[in-house]
Amino acid sequence: MDSSLFTFLYGLCITLLVIIYLKGYRSGNRKMENIAFQNVVSTTIVVMLLDIVLELFVDGKPDPGLIHWNYGLTENNLVLAALAAYLWLEYVDCFLSDGKKIGRVVYYLQMVPIAVCIFMVLFTPLTHWIFYINEKNVCVKGPLYPYFAWATVFFVVLPAIKVVARLHSHKECPFFKRREMYSKLIFGLFPILGGFVTLLEPRLPSFWPSFTMALFYIYLDNISTHSSVDSLTRLNNRRVFDQYLESLGQGDVKNAFLMMIDVNFFKQINDHFGHLEGDKALVHVAQILKNQGDNHGLFIARIGGDEFALVKKGANEEEAQKIEKSIRQRVDEFNGTGSADYQLSLSIGYAFFKGSIKGLFKESDDALYKNKMEMHRAIKSSS
């Protein structure tokens, strides 16, 4: 590829990545998942900058003094290239674990390939395993370069395998979460296709531009997801809930119920313990409901300040009662831990779909109100 065209293409990709990085940095989002994504973006920027420097000023330039620079810059470039792919794996792990750290054993096992890659690159000036610089100051691929390249691809493919496994084992995970998982699968197609193009035509360096397009795709998907997810509880928000109910009314659905949930005396929690503690209470409730979603295949949403909704298709009265009982048991278990200075209490009401979404919502809301009055009377009489 012509140097000017190469510089223009890579410069365009770097500009796009810098914009993505600055947008993420200025958002103030310091969650582990966002930090992990920022790490992928920043490392990719440095890799492409080094590619430009090598292409324009070092590789192939007839100056013996530049040979050592060629070795050093190429080493750093390859190490960072492998690291960028590995950081993508870390980002997907962070996404799948909802920001929690993965197991120590899995972490170290995943570190083995990247450690081997870095080891081979660092010793390449002595061994010529991955590359060597000839007398014309041109970088030539070594005998183990294909293995290094496939190891980099491995860190792009492995996250896709993990996502497929999660989709298979959590068939009823939240709608927005499944959509995010599909986007992570699609991500891998871009660099894989770019890698194959580069293998077929080495003069057309398409891997990193395709990697950039994949990151841009994930960035746009993240923006779309944030408009569908409640920022505090990470549940579906009211907009997605309304869309889900609308699709329920348009489909041929039988034996579906809507369960409405409300936190009792939530205002008192906010007034006596502060809004931060009130937010924690909502997160605790959301986690209890998420566990029910995993066990029973529920659509879950936060539809108001302290109001939540569950939808279950293909269920009967017995299953609805079982879910309600399980939720109350989880709340009792939380209260038994003594981890909060207050006692959580929920009002729950549900109704089955009979052909009208408005009717379903009204019946569920009426059942919730009835239960709330009963709960309030019971709590006040016992105090």
Image (tube, rainbow, N blue to C red):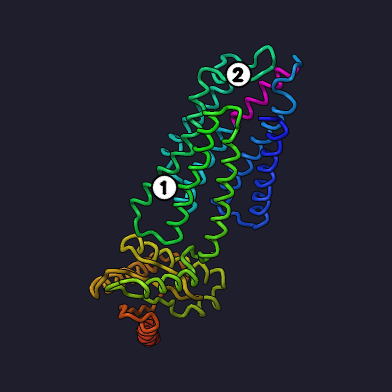
Give the labeled residue for mark 1.
163
**Residue 113, relative to residue 163: is it above or below?**
above
Residue 283, percent across and down? Answer: 47, 66
Residue 140: give its label.
2
Residue found at x 49% / y 65%: 233
Residue furthest to the top in view is 135
Q: Secondary structure at mark 2?
A: strand
- The quadrant where residue 285 appears: bottom left
Between 79 and 66, which is closer to the camera in this rendering? 66
Residue 113, percent across and down? Answer: 47, 30
Q: Secondary structure at mark 1?
A: helix
Residue found at x 61% / y 28%: 203
Crowding at label 2, few (<14), some or many (≥20) Cα neighbours within 10 Å? few
- Between disc 1 and disc 2, the foreground one is 2
Residue 139 shown left or right of residue 190 in the figure: right
Q: Which residues are magenta?
A: 65-79
**Residue 212 makes an appearance in the image:** yes
